[in-house]
Image (cartoon, coloured by chain):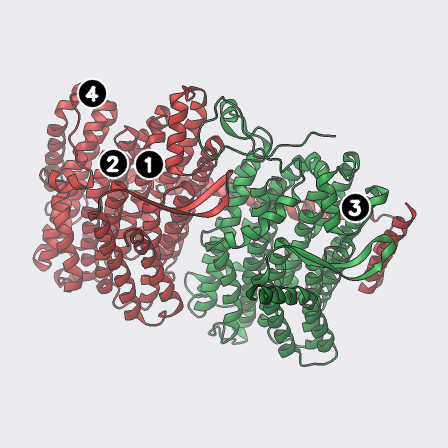
């Protein structure tokens, strides 16, 4: 039984997705029920699996060209993947339940739940994958389920465009990812994580790593392109804010808690490789922290409630990626773990707000929701505090772990990390004050109601881990939140002050946000560069027009006028210059062609006999 | 006892092989002479699919036998047989034929001739794939091509159809002539005592001895490459294809792009790779450059297209580049990938053309800027097109992805010294690896144009029809109806089954393709599956045989 458990967890949601596609397409409630049941089953299985001690490794051959290339379909069950399984299925279950309420009136509810189940399958595949190719397969599949769900309301041009943008940004990342996989296979002949690890260890033992260091560095950076797309790091981050066009529960599950964290998960999984290539790690760390700072700056000026949260997600993902870069994979996983809960909570909270506001997302049209929606208010407050790094709440511990690691490896990055923490406190206070505390600024806000129980219960449940997931006795069994080995590592001057500085950043940021935004009806600060996202979209639009569209137009012209025009006619003119066959074909009919063919056959036989 | 029964069944199924050819041929003749066109055609196609599936189930190892002698003194005989590769092609042909016949909508005039043409194409394809004889392979491939010219010229779409019909006719005629010259050259270069059309015999001979002098191989190979290449739409001989597919009636486009185009690739795998390895190696650099043209140049041309039918045509041309890449890599991974991709591309492009045809029939336009939001009135067509689109841009779960993966691994590991520790130390990339990277970028490009097309045609607010059709009051409300849904679902099912279990095809193909690789190429230089080489030494996936 126990060795079948991973397969049940994995294929339950796929079964549901297929059943919805093939059978229950027209039954909305039944489809929703199937989908929820499948994820509940997976969650149950994950709990059972977590209670079992010991690792598992089951595989069978999917593409077998051994010994040259062997691609297994296999699963690895260890502490890392068990933890991730619980996060994915746990948050997933709550989001599914919440969706039943949120999507109640949607015409295409069946399609929505089909997509959600497909996503669960793909995401669980990423978690369990034991080799690069399988990881890549599910990596692409989460991409497509994300495409389907972002574009759920496909009649809206913005949603359809956002879906395309997300898919393409990820494809560009995957282009590099696949090159990286091929390079690693080219070196070692394997795509299996475990085998790769032992092979590289073998190289290291024999002192052969030095010669292939440039190659390995390039390979590692190529693999990193995958996480850059999936976890939306600069410069491939542009798709994530647009992805908020999808239904809000989708944003909570896919674009906050789980899928976007897959990049971090992959990097932690291949930390044995990253350990060998310091230059690549340095690049990763800088890309992470740049994303963290830039996204936080952009978040301070957004007025769409979901977009603020989206930029905050970008920023937190930047933290995690950066943590991997400073060789603190465990801290990255810790933050992934806590972030999944409080960010899912925040998104679902924003969902109830949007639901109550009749799909109004502009925070400047909200206000005063504290009294109208108490459950949302309190849970959102807890989520906000956790995200800001308020002591005793989960986010504080994991962020602290990352900042400590940064301080130890790279003081400059740590300073930027603290600055980001300050910004986080500032923009989240802004959001919270404007939405919940300030006076209502529209009719919808004055008449808002608390959402039905099926939507508020998930909020209450998520609030528990959002508060407590960082405590040592909670995180410990997941192999997270361990003690820092501060004694063995020299570290910088900054190291001892990190917790103090982090708390100060939280207090200063929150106070500043409260002072600036208390009782405001419009934003007193106006920085166009932040609001316009540093003009990335505009820049890419020009870039695409100049390069890709230009290239497309140029090749089309060459194809039409050079290859087809001059080329084909010129060549045919020369070849057929004497013209006997051409005339045959043009004046005669197609029988002439058949005749020619017969002639050819006779010629063949004739030649064969003679020579 | 059980064994005997099994043997008998197997014997019967071997004996049934010629019926794969006879069924469509006889049905075509009947239809031509006035039998009820649609029922007979669909019935024959379904029966043939049944026969093909029967062969798949009973297939154990390659077999071939002589049906009748033609010219004994020349060793020219009608030799039929099956191995993994031809079995896959037979399955592809029967699937696409059934799909094409089933999806044929009302033909205004000459319905019987139309259906008969489709069946003749199918029969020609079937004959080419079950002939293990060079002469009959060539003859059947011609038989299959001729009806397509008629279909385009007589029943085609648009003002351009006659021009397109002539263009494809002349183009493919030139290709056939070049190919014929190449084949004659090949036959003439065989040592006198060993001249035969028998492909099985030729391959046996080629594995043991250097059958054809390398100097001769070097001039024969480019003739075959050009001859087959024109049919496959190898860059820069591709410009006939998009126009012809746009002008062709939907079933003809499905059959031509799905099946007939694969003749050339099949021919390369059957003839050029096993018999002309030295010639192939001498020309791989040229081939690699041309196939990069297929992937990137044509890929970007596809991005610029403003009509759905032309876009699909260019996308079909582009994907040929990947199949060429797999063949050019000359190792078992690449060749298997190329073969599986022939199957995968055949099904996915047929579905895409079929849906495009339905869209045209309902809206009267193929212009992307006149279409939009069709997913609302036609959810089923949108679903199927979406699935086929994702298949064609290489999404896991469909056969296309598995084959692309094999092609990329095969190509990245191809060429001498491409592999292992020393190669990594040197850090240089050869042309194969550059082509692989171009191919990977092509995957991005194909996502760009396909998603853009899907967005324009099916998503967004509904913009139903061309001005003409709108004026005529043509309502765009109906989705694909009734049993024709099953036709497309059937083709998609083929893609999904192979996508989940590529081993089904790979296991059947591997023995054949391993034998196809000439002895010195398939030499047993294998990678260490894992682990560190004892002393730094490059391990090579495919050893290039010495020139000359």
Tell which subunit mark 2 falls on: A
Hey, which quadrant is residue A226 in on the image?
top left
Mark 3: secondary structure: helix
* Residue A597 shows in the view: yes
Quadrant of the rendered image containing residue B262 = bottom right
As drawn, the label of residue A489 is: 4
In front of the other: B354 or A236: B354
Write down which chain is painted red.
A
Which of the image's four quarters has the C terminus of chain B? top right
Q: Label 3 to label 2, Cα distance in Å?
A: 62 Å
> Which labelled disc corresponds to residue A332?
2
Q: Is A52 situated above or below B386?
A: above
The residue that disc 3 covers is B182
- Of all chains, the one bearing label 4 is A
Answer with left or right where residue A134 lies relative to residue B19. left
Identify the residue at horizontal 48%, vertical 74% (top origin): B478
Residue at image mark 1? A267
Can see residue A302? Answer: no
Are callouts 1 and 4 both on one chain?
A: yes
Query: Mark 3, chain letter?
Result: B
Q: Classify A179 as above or below B401.
A: above
Which residue sits furthest left?
A371
Question: How far apart in space, not on screen, are marks 3 and 4 (Cα)?
Answer: 72 Å
SS under mark 4? loop
Instruction: Tell me, yes or no, whether the two marked residues, 1 and 2, touch with CB atoms within 8 Å.
Output: yes
**Disc number lying in front (3 or 2):** 3
Residue at the extreme front of the image, as rendered: B1
**Chain coloured green:** B
């Amino acid at each position: 039984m126990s060795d079948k458990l991973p397969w049940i967890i994995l294929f339950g949601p796929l079964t549901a997705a297929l059943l919805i596609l093939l059978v229950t397409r027209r039954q909305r409630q039944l489809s929703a029920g199937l989908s929820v049941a499948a994820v509940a089953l997976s969650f149950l299985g994950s709990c059972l699996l977590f209670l079992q001690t010991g690792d598992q490794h089951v595989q069978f051959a999917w593409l077998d060209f051994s010994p040259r290339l062997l691609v297994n379909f296999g699963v690895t069950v260890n502490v890392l993947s068990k933890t991730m399984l619980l996060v994915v299925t746990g948050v997933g279950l709550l989001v599914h339940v919440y969706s039943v309420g949120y999507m109640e009136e949607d015409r295409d509810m069946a399609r929505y739940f089909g997509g959600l189940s497909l996503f669960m399958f793909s995401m669980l595949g990423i978690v369990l994958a034991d080799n690069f190719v399988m990881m890549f397969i599910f990596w692409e599949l989460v991409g497509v389920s994300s495409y389907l769900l972002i574009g759920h309301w496909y009649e809206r041009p913005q949603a359809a465009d956002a879906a395309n943008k997300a898919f393409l940004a990820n494809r560009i990342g995957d282009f590099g990812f696949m090159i990286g996989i091929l390079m690693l296979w080219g070196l070692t002949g394997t795509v299996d994580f475990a085998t790769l690890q032992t092979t590289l260890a073998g190289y290291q033992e024999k002192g052969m790593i030095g010669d292939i260091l440039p190659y390995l560095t390039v390979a590692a950076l190529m693999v990193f392109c995958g996480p850059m797309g999936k976890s939306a790091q600069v410069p491939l981050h542009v798709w994530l804010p647009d992805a908020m066009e999808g239904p809000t529960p989708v944003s909570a599950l896919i674009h906050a808690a789980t899928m976007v964290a897959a990049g971090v998960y992959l990097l932690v999984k291949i930390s044995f490789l990253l350990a060998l290539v310091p230059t690549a790690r340095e690049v990763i760390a800088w890309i992470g922290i740049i994303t963290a700072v830039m996204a936080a700056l952009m978040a301070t000026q957004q007025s769409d409630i979901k977009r603020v949260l989206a930029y905050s997600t970008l920023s937190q993902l930047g933290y995690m990626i950066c943590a991997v870069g400073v060789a603190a994979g465990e801290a990255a996983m810790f933050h992934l773990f806590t972030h999944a809960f409080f960010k899912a909570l925040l998104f679902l909270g924003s969902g109830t707000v949007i639901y109550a506001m009749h799909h109004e997302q502009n925070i400047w049209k909200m206000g005063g929701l504290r009294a109208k929606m108490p459950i949302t208010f309190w849970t959102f407050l807890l989520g906000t505090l956790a995200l800001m790094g308020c002591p005793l709440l989960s986010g504080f511990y994991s962020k602290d772990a990352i900042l400590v690691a940064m301080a130890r490896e790279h003081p400059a990055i740590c300073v930027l990390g603290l600055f980001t923490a300050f910004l986080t406190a500032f923009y989240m206070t802004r959001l919270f004050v404007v939405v919940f505390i300030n006076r209502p600024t529209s009719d919808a806000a004055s008449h808002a109601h608390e959402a039905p129980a099926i939507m508020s219960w998930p909020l209450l449940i998520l609030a528990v881990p959002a508060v407590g997931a960082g405590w040592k006795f909670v995180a410990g069994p997941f192999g997270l939140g361990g003690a820092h080995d501060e004694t063995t590592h020299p570290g910088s001057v900054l190291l001892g002050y990190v917790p103090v500085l982090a708390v100060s950043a939280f207090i200063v940021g929150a106070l500043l946000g409260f002072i600036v935004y208390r009782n405001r009806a419009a934003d007193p600060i106006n920085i166009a560069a932040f609001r316009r996202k540093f003009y990335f979209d505009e820049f890419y639009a020009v870039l695409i027009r100049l390069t890709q569209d230009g290239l497309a137009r140029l090749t089309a012209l060459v194809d039409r006028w050079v290859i087809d025009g001059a080329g084909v006619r010129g060549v045919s003119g020369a070849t057929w210059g004497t013209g006997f066959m051409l005339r045959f074909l043009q004046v005669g009919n197609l029988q002439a062609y058949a005749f020619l063919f017969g002639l050819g056959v006779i010629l063949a036989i004739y030649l064969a006999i003679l020579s | 006892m059980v064994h005997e029964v099994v043997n008998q069944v197997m014997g019967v199924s071997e004996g049934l092989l010629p019926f794969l050819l006879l069924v469509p041929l006889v049905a075509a003749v009947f239809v031509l002479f006035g039998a009820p066109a649609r029922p007979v055609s669909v019935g024959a196609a379904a029966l043939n699919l049944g026969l093909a599936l029967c062969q798949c189930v009973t297939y154990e190892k390659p077999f071939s036998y002589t049906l009748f002698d033609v010219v004994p003194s020349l060793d020219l005989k009608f030799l039929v047989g099956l191995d993994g590769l031809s079995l896959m092609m037979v399955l592809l042909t029967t699937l696409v034929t059934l799909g094409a016949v089933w999806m044929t909508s009302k033909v205004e005039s000459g319905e019987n001739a139309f259906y008969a043409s489709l069946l003749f194409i199918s029969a020609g394809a079937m004959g080419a794939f079950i002939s293990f004889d060079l002469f009959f392979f060539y003859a059947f491939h011609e038989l299959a091509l001729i009806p397509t010219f008629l279909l385009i010229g007589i029943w085609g779409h648009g003002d351009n159809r006659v021009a397109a019909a002539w263009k494809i006719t002349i183009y493919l005629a030139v290709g056939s002539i070049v190919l014929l010259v190449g084949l004659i050259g090949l036959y003439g270069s065989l040592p006198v005592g060993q001249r035969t059309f028998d492909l099985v015999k030729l391959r046996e001979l080629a594995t043991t001895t250097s059958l054809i002098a390398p100097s001769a191989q070097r001039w024969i190979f480019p003739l075959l490459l050009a001859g087959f290449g024109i049919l496959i739409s190898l860059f820069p001989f591709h410009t006939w294809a998009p126009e012809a597919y746009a002008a062709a009636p939907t079933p003809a486009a499905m059959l031509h792009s799905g099946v007939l185009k694969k003749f050339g690739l099949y021919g390369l795998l059957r003839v050029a790779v096993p018999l002309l390895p030295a010639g192939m190696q001498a020309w791989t650099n040229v081939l690699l450059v041309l196939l990069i043209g297929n992937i990137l140049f044509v890929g970007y041309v596809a991005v610029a297209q403003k009509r759905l039918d032309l876009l699909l045509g260019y996308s079909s041309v582009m994907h040929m580049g990947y199949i060429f890449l797999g063949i050019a890599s000359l190792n078992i991974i690449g060749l298997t990938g190329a073969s599986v991709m022939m199957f995968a591309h055949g099904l996915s492009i047929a579905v895409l053309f079929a849906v495009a045809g339905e869209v045209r029939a309902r809206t009267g336009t193929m212009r992307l800027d006149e279409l939009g939001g069709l997913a609302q009135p036609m959810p089923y067509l949108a679903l199927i097109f979406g699935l086929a689109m994702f298949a064609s841009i290489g999404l896991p779960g469909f056969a296309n992805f598995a084959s692309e993966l094999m092609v990329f691994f095969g190509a990245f590991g191809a060429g001498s010294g491409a592999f292992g520790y020393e190669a990594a130390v040197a850090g240089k990339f050869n042309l194969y690896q550059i082509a692989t990277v171009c191919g990977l970028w092509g995957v991005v490009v194909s996502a760009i144009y396909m998603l853009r097309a899907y967005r324009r045609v099916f998503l967004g607010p509904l913009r139903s029809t061309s001005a003409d059709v709108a004026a005529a009051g043509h309502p765009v409300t109906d989705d694909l109806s009734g049993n024709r849904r099953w036709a497309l679902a059937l083709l998609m099912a083929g893609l999904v089954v192979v996508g989940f279990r590529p081993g089904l095809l790979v296991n059947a193909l591997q023995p054949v393709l391993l034998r196809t690789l000439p002895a010195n190429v398939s030499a047993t230089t294998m990678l260490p599956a894992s682990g560190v080489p004892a002393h730094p030494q490059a391990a090579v996936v495919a050893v290039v045989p010495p020139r000359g």
